[in-house]
Image (tube, rainbow, N blue to C red):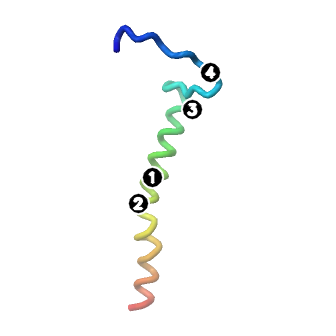
């Protein structure tokens, strides 16, 4: 792996450094975390209303 040459950088290449990459990874992690809790947050008032 250490001897492997870097790939060709094109318009579709996502650089794994810089602010854009950090923002993209952070946003993706935040969206996934929110999607885990959203069903419970939306169903709790509904269940409380039925009780």
Question: Can you say whether 31 is above or below 22 in the image?
Answer: below
Residue 45: horizontal and vertical position, in percent? 45, 80
Nearest to the eye among marks 3 and 4: give it: 4
Residue 20: name its quadrant: top right
Q: Which residue is mark 1?
A: 32
| Tag 2 near tag 3, CB within 8 Å | no
Q: Which residue is mark 3?
A: 20
| Tag 1 near tag 4, CB within 8 Å | no
- How far apart are the two marked residues, 1 and 4, measured between alpha carbons? 29 Å
Residue 12: horizontal and vertical position, in percent? 61, 28
User: Which element type, helix, strand or loop, lies under badge 3?
Assistant: helix
> Looking at the image, which residue sits at the far top?
3
Q: Earlier in the sequence, mark 3 or mark 4?
A: 4
Of residues 8 and 22, the one drawn nearer to the viewer in this rendering = 8
> Looking at the image, which residue sits at the far right?
11
Left or right side of 36 for 22: right
| Tag 1 near tag 3, CB within 8 Å | no
User: Which element type, helix, strand or loop, lies under badge 1?
Assistant: helix
| Tag 2 near tag 1, CB within 8 Å | yes
Q: Which residue is mark 2?
A: 36
- How far apart are the two marked residues, 2 and 3, measured between alpha carbons? 25 Å
Q: Earlier in the sequence, mark 1 or mark 3?
A: 3
Question: Can you say whether 51 is above or below 23 in the image?
Answer: below
Q: Earlier in the sequence, mark 2 or mark 4?
A: 4
Q: Which residue is mark 4?
A: 10
Left or right side of 3 for 31: right
Residue at the location (65% across, 24% down)?
Answer: 11
């Amino acid at each position: 792996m250490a001897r492997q040459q870097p790939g060709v950088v094109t318009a579709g290449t996502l650089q794994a450094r810089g602010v854009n990459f950090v923002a993209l990874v952070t946003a993706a992690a935040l969206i996934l975390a929110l999607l885990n809790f959203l069903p419970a947050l939306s169903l709790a008032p509904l269940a409380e209303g039925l009780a």
